[in-house]
Image: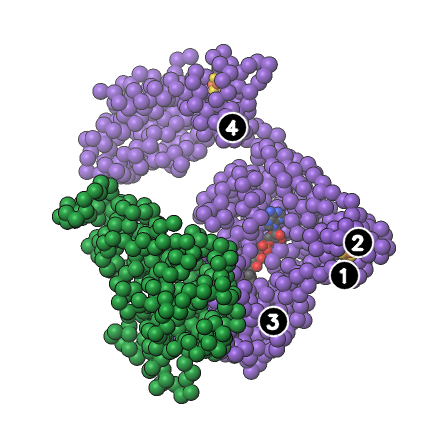
Amino acid sequence: MKIPYYPGCTLHERARDFDVSARECAKALGVELEELPIWTCCGAVFPLVTDSVMDILAGVRNLEYASRIGDKLVTLCSFCYNVLKRTNRVMRDDLEKREKANLFLRADTAAREEVESYTKTDYTGQVEVLHYIEMLRDVVGFDELRKKVENGLGGLNVAPYYGCMLLRPKKEMEFDDPEQPTVFEDLLATLGCDIVDFPMKTECCGGFQIVNDEELAVMCSQNVVSSAIKRNADVIVTTCPLCRYNLDKKQEEMIERVRGFRRIPVIYFTQLLGLALGIDEEHIDFSDNYVDPRPVLAEKSLL
Amino acid sequence: MERRIGVFVCHCGSNIAGVVDVKRVAEELRKYPGVAYSTDYTYMCSDPGQNLVKDAIKKHDLTGVIVAACSPTLHETTFRRAGRAAGVNPYQVEIANIREHCSWVHQGEKEAATEKATRIIKTMVEKAVLDEALDPIAVPMTHRALVVGAGISGIQAALDIANAGYEVIVVEKDPSIGGHMAQLSETFPTLDCSQCIMTPKMVEVSQHPKIKLMTYSEIDDVSGYVGSFKVKIRKKAAYVDRDTCNGCGLCMEKCPAKTPSEFDEGLADRKAIYTPFPQAVPNKPVIDAEHCTYFLKDGKCGICQKICPVDAVDFEQKDEIIEEEVGAIIVATGYDLYPIENMGEYGGGKYEDVITSLQFERMLSASGPTGGEVLRPSDGEVPNEVVFLTCCGSRDPELHMPYCSKVCCMYLTKHAMLYKHKVHDGQAYVFYMDVRTAGKGYEEFYTRAAEEDDVLYVRGKVSKIFEEDGKVMVWGVDTLTGKKVEIAADLVVLGLATVPNVAAKELANKLKIHTDEWGFLAEAHPKLRPVESLSPGFYLAGAAQGPKDIPEAVAQASGAASKVADLFAEEEYHREPIIAVINDDTCAGCKVCVSVCPYDAAEFIEEDGVARIQEAICEGCGACIAACPSGSAQQRNLTDEQLYRMVSAALEG
Ligand SMILES: Cc1cc2nc3c(=O)[nH]c(=O)nc-3n(C[C@H](O)[C@H](O)[C@H](O)COP(=O)(O)OP(=O)(O)OC[C@H]3O[C@@H](n4cnc5c(N)ncnc54)[C@H](O)[C@@H]3O)c2cc1C
Ligand code: SF4
Ligand code: SF4
C-alpha cells in the first residue's frame, strides 16, 4: 500500500532519525510512504491572520501536490501536521479563501513547466491529512500492529508526551481530547510498554520560545521532564522534532539549573516502534540523541 | 346581506397624524365600495374613541368595523369588545395597522404614507366584507391537572392546585419525590436545613386528598389537547407491592447486593432493594433489577421475599400502563449537573478528590454518607485546603455552555462557609469570574463568607488540576495581581453547570413542547408569559425552564399553578375559531391535509370519503390550506377569495 508522505524540512535535516525510523517501520508494516515528488516548507506556523490568503499558500501547495498522487497525506512532525491539517480545513470550509488560493495555484502551475501530464482541477481540501499515529491506528490498525510486534517492550516505563500541536485547537485538529488524550497510550500499549501517566503530558515544551526566550522555554521543558522523571519514567517519547530538541538537548541546561537532576532519554515514538518491530538498530539510529537511550534500553534487554 | 363597514382612522396623537393625512384618508375611504361610514379621531383606544365606534355602529347600522390604528397585538381585543357591546360580532372587527406598518416607517414621506395608509385600509375592507360572524369554539374541560416531576417545583405546583380545589396527578420517575432539594444540606442565604423545610411539603403531597401520587412512574404518551389530554403513564415494575409494604425496611437491611447510591452521588452504596433516603416519600422500597442478585443470577437469593413480614415482594411484577385524562399539564422536570467527565482539564472523573458540588452537598448533610463531616474520598482524611471552582462548564461558549448557571456562585459560597464552620483552621479558596449575587440577602451572604469566615476569593480561572504527592495541585491565575497561583489542595469542588435533566428532553419530545437549544423548556414569552409553554395547556415550573434557585423555582411553580387554576375556573375551554374548514362537496379525499397537519387535527372520514378538521385541535397554522390541491381546505375569515381581494386592493392602480 502506497501513501503520500510529507516529511517536512526538519526531518530532512536535524531529525533524520525520525524520518528513517518512520520509513523503516512503515515498510515493516506493509506501507510504502511515498514522499511527495516536489514539496516545500509547510509554513511552520499556522497563520493567525484571517484576512489574507498569502500565509496559507505554502501549505495549500503541498496539499495540492499530494492530491495528484493520492487521497491521503501522512506526516510526522507535529508542527507540519498542525499547519497542514488546519490549512486543509480552510480549503474545505472557507469558499472565498479556497477560490483565491486556487487562482494562485493556477498561475503557479502554469508558470512552472515541470508539471506536465497533469490535468488541473481545483484543490478543495479533498486530501485527508493524517498523522503517522492515525495511520497506524486507522490504516494499519492497532490489532494488526500488535501481531507484527516482535519484541514486546514490557518493563520499559514510557512517558508519552503529546505537547500542544497535535491536539490544539481541538475543533480544528480533531485528533484527540486535548485535556485527557489517550491515543498515544493506546499505541504504546499495543507495543507492550508500561505506560507512565504524567500530568504534564499536554503542557507546552516551550516551542519556538527557545529562539527568543531560552530561559522561559527551558523552564517549560524542565517542568515536563521533571514530571515524567518523578513518575519513574525510563524514557519520554515525542512526536515532534522541536519538542525533542527542547526536552532532550536542553537537559544540558537543566543539569545546571537543578541540583541532582537525573537525565532521561527523549526519543521519537517511531524509534520505539522500530525496536518493537525488530528493526535494525542502524535504521533506528540513536546517535543523534543528546541523552543516550541505549544504556537504559540495554538494561531492559531491548537492544 | 348588504355589508356596511365603518372605518375609524386613529391619529394616535401625532404618531400617525404627524405623518399620515388622516382626514384625507377618512375621506377617501368614505367613497370606497362597502364602506358606509368613515371618520377619524385623536385616540381611538380611549373611552370616547371606543364610544365613537359603538355609537356609529348603532346609528349607521354597521355590520363590520375597521379601526385603522396600531398593531392588532395591542388593541384588537379592545375594539372587538367594543364591537360586541354594540352588536357586531368580534370576528367582524378588524384592525388596519397604519402605525407600525406605515407612519413609523415613513416619517418625512407624508404623501406616500397617506397613499399607503389608504391602501392598507382598503385591503382590510376587502377582507371585512367577507368576514363571517364566528363564535369561539367551546371544548370540554377536565378539571384535573398533571404535574410531571416532583422536585420542589412540582411539589409546590401540585399543592397549590390541590389547595385551589382541583385534582392533581403527580408523576415522578424516581422511587421518591423530593428532587435535588432533598439532597441539599443547608440552603443559602439563610442556611436553613433543606430537609427540614422540604419534608413537611413532601408529606403533605402524599396525604393530600386531591393528589394522586405516582412515583417510580414515567409518561409514556400524551395525546389530545388543552382541556382534555389523554395521558398514558408507565408505572415501572418495583417488584414490591407498594400498597401492601409497610415500610419496615427489613429487606433493605438483609439484601446482599450493593451499588453506588444515586442519592448520595456515589459517595456511599445502597442496596438493590432500596429507598433513596430515610425520609423518602413514599417510604416504600423498590427493587433495582439491574443490580439485584435474584434477577442477575436466575432466581438465586430472594432473601427480601423470604424476610418480608407482609409478603410484599413480587418478582413477577410487570410495568403497568395507566391511562388518565387531564385538562392541563405542568412540566417540572428539573435539572442535572453537567457531567464532571467533561472537565478534562480538571481531571474530572479521573481524580477521586476532585468532586462535584452535589457530592460536597451530600458530605455536608448531617444525614449524608459522612454524617456531615467533610472528608476526602481518597483517604477519609479531613481536608485542610479546599478549592472551590465556579463556572465549571458555564459561561464558556467555546467549549461548554454559554449561559450562567446562576446558582453556583451562591452554593459554592455556602459550601466554603459551611466547610469553615466545620474545619475552623482549614483554608477555603473560591476561584471566580464574577461572584453573582443577585437575590435578596445574597450579597450579604457572600460578604459574610469573605469577611467573617475568611473564605479567600481569587478572581481568575483555573487552567489545570492534577495529582502530585497525595495533593490535588491547582494551577490558576489571580487576575487582580496578574500572578500565577498554585495551590496544593486536599480537595477540589467543581461548581458544574446546570443542564436540563436528560429524561426531560425525551419528555419534551413526547409532549411536543419546545425547548431551547440546550434542552431547557421554552416559555411562551420571555418576559410576559414566563410560566406557559407555547403549546396551549402546558405550563413550566422550576429548573426545567432554566437554572434557578429554590425561591425562584417555588415562585414559578406557584405562578404555573395559578395559571392552571385560572384555566380551570371556566367550565369549558374557549379556543380561537380562526381555523381550517374543509368543504365536503369539493374534497377529493386525497388525504394530503392529513399528512401535512403538524397537530394531527385533519382526519379522514372513511364512510364519507372526505377529510375533516377537528375543531378542538386545529391551531389554524394553514399547512393543509396551502397543501390542498382542490382548494377545499380554507381558513375561516381568511379564505382564498378574501386573500385574492385583499391582494388586488393592495396592488390596485
Ligand atoms: C450543589 C447545589 C446546591 C444548591 N444549593 C441551593 C441552596 O442552598 N439554595 C437554593 O435556593 N438553591 C440551591 N440549589 C438549587 C436547587 O437545587 C434548585 O433550585 C431546585 O432543586 C430546583 O428544583 P426543581 O424541582 O425545579 O428541580 P429538581 O430538584 O431537579 O426536581 C425535578 C424532579 O423531576 C423528576 N423528573 C425529571 N424528569 C422526569 C420525567 N421525565 N418524568 C418524571 N419525573 C421526572 C426528577 O426525578 C426530580 O425529582 C442548589 C443546587 C446545587 C446543584
Ligand atoms: S432478591 Fe436478593 S439481591 Fe435482590 S433485592 Fe432481594 S435481597 Fe436484594
Ligand atoms: S387535501 Fe384537500 S382534497 Fe385532499 S383530503 Fe384534504 S381537503 Fe380533501
User: The N terminus of chain B is located in which quarter?
Assistant: top left
Sequence-first tag of 4 and 3: 3
The quadrant in which residue B363 appears is bottom right
The lab-note entry on whether marks 3 and 1 share a chain reads yes
Q: Note whether ligand 1 is within 8 Å of mark 3.
A: no
Residue B78 location in percent, x, y? Answer: 43, 34
In the picture of the structure, the residue carrying the numbered disc 1 is B256
Quarter residue B485 falls in: bottom left
Task: Give the CA distance from mark 2 to mark 1.
Answer: 12 Å
- Is residue A45 placed above or below B67 in the rendered structure? below
The mark found on residue B377 in the picture is 3
Residue at image mark 4: B618
Q: Which residue is denoted by mark 2 in the rendering? A: B300
Residue at (76, 61) in percent of width and height: B256
Q: How busy is the neighbourhood of tag 1: few (under 14 within 10 Å), some, or many (20 plus)?
A: some
Callout 4: SS: loop
Q: In the image, what residue type sits under mark 1?
A: Pro
* Neighbours of disc 3 within 10 Å: few (<14), some (14-19), many (20+): some
Q: CA distance from mark 4 to mark 3?
A: 57 Å
Name the secondary structure under disc 2.
Answer: loop
Q: Is residue B505 left or right of residue B100?
A: right
| Mark 2 / mark 4, whichever is N-terminal | 2
Q: Colour of chain B?
A: purple
User: Which residue sits at x=74%, y=51%?
Assistant: B295
Disc 4: host chain: B
Instruction: Report whether A153 appears left or right of B165.
Output: left
Using a 10 Å C-alpha cutoff, classify the residue at mark 4 as few (fewer than 14 neighbours), some (14 to 19) or many (20 or more).
Answer: many
Judge whether B198 appears above or below B638 on screen. Answer: below
Residue B51 at x, y = what percent?
40, 30
